[in-house]
Amino acid sequence: MGELRFAVHPPELLDAFPGFDQTYVTGHDLVPSPSHCSIDNGQLVCRHSVGQSAVFVVPWRVERFGKLLLRTATLLDRTEPYQLQVELARGKLNQVRNQLADWQSVGLAPSAESRESVEHAIRHFVRAVAHQDDPPTTAFEAGQALSHALEAAERLTADYTRQALAARHRQYPQFSTLLSCCLGHAAPQKKWGPSFLSAFNSAVVPINWKHIEPHEGEYRWDAYDRQVKWCQKHRLITRGGPLLDFGPEGIPDWLWLWEGDFDNVVSFVSDFTETVVSRYLGKIRVWEVTNRANSGDLLSFNEEQRLRLTVKILEVARQIDAEAQFVIRVDQPWGHYAAGRTDQLSPLDFADALLRADLGLGGVDLEISFGYSPGGATPCDLMEVSRLLDRWSMLGVPLQLTLAFPSSEVPDPNAVRKVVVPPNVWRRAWDEQAQADWLAELVTLALAKSTIQAIAWAHFCDADEHDWPHAGLLRADGTPKPAFDQLARIRREHLR
């Protein structure tokens, strides 16, 4: 076992440490590895099995940016403690400078403000390293270096987004990217039509087994039939699914009687898949095969069984509709959830294994849901998101995104997922304007990348039953939030 030790100043910061279940180490492949963190003699100690060097990852509060998931540079094991704030600043500054070099090599012209932020970060970092015999000065300067490095990351990513969008528009006046929203589990309302169509050119019908077959053999199709018919009426490209959600809200209660009985569950899943795809044959052209297969603990199945179930669903669905496109959705795509588990595959490796099987999988959908715990993605800066999308693009298949962000932290009576919106995490209050700003940044960044084929928002209206608390684009009274206006603007400016 390797060991990394960190000194923190002031030491009282360790009293409010974010929780050892949120810290982990990775190797050069950025895959979370089993580790054990503890406080020992006033130091943060991380024991790991990566090797003689590792990257330490931790949620850390930064002035003006809130609590973000940050990583050090690669560190060698040693008995002498590292200064944690210095190493976090080094890690982010190293990432920023490397990304800047990569972008400049393909023609990025960084703004004066971006260059200034990088220079400020370097100056503060040099002071932090030079005064490591003075912990208060080192901690202050490292904090300033980290804050300026994050500012540089945000500004450089904005430069990249703006210039990459301009380059794409010189070739395509309007993009063919699909922009959609989940319709929820109720029939569409008549008043939705004009507003929905002003923002979206596609829609998601969230085929949910628990809603369709609440009792074995008894099917309830009305809401989804009406959704499909509504999409056809308005000529919206329709995505259906997931055919199987590996989370606890995705299967009917009666199926839990078969927990651990893999063969019987495969039979039930195959029958349901055949029934659904046959019903909407020729009406739904894109099927989401599974969701959370990489992370979920459905019916206590292990990683291999989750893979086999996904393969079986894909085989059955393709036999019914060979012309449809099939995708899988990967939640928590950074793989943070794997830190305390025994899974052998990272989210990227999980998807790669299915693609290499040559089963006709046509794409991967990445779910990025900031602001929720458990099950959501730990917040990170915009450059980290860009790097994630580039890493997944190496799979060589079209990517899709499913996005969610809360507009409030109060309990949501219509949310079915047992998650909360932790207060004092984001750089500002969880409110409607924060949701709108984040949505605009993420969607425009995605549109700047030609590998992103489709973007979906988690759900349309907070009045209907939904997964993520307060993630809707309409309030419970049906009035639009600022986020909806942002999407409508993006549709007008960039999409067919």
Image: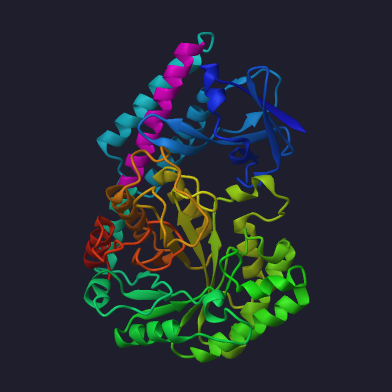
Instruction: Please name the residue shown 53% across and 81% down the image.
Output: 212
- Between 6 and 435, which is closer to the camera in this rendering? 435
The quarter in which the N terminus is drawn is top right
- Between 145 and 237, which is closer to the camera in this rendering? 237
- Between 436 and 285, which is closer to the camera in this rendering? 436
Instruction: Please name the residue shown 70% across and 35% down the image.
Output: 36
The quarter in which the C terminus is drawn is bottom left
Disc count in the image? 0
Instruction: Please name the residue shown 71% across and 76% down the image.
Output: 265
Q: Would residue 322 be visible to someone looking at this image? A: no
Image spot of residue 128 (x, y percent) = 46, 17
In the drawing, does residue 31 fall left or right of residue 426? right
Q: Is residue 227 above or below residue 344?
A: below
Image spot of residue 93 (x, y percent) = 45, 32
- Residue span colored magenta: 135-158
Instruction: Please name the residue shown 37% across and 44% down the image.
Output: 104
Q: Is residue 228 above or below residue 101?
A: below
Does 345 appear in magenta? no
Which quadrant of the figure has residue 53? Answer: top right
Q: Would residue 332 be visible to someone looking at this image? A: yes
Which quadrant of the figure has residue 271? Answer: bottom right
Image spot of residue 254 (x, y percent) = 66, 75
Q: Residue furthest top?
A: 133
Q: Is residue 42 above or below residue 199?
A: above
Does 147 appear in magenta? yes
Name the image colouring: rainbow
Which quadrant of the figure has residue 332? Answer: bottom right
- Between 96 and 72, which is closer to the camera in this rendering? 72
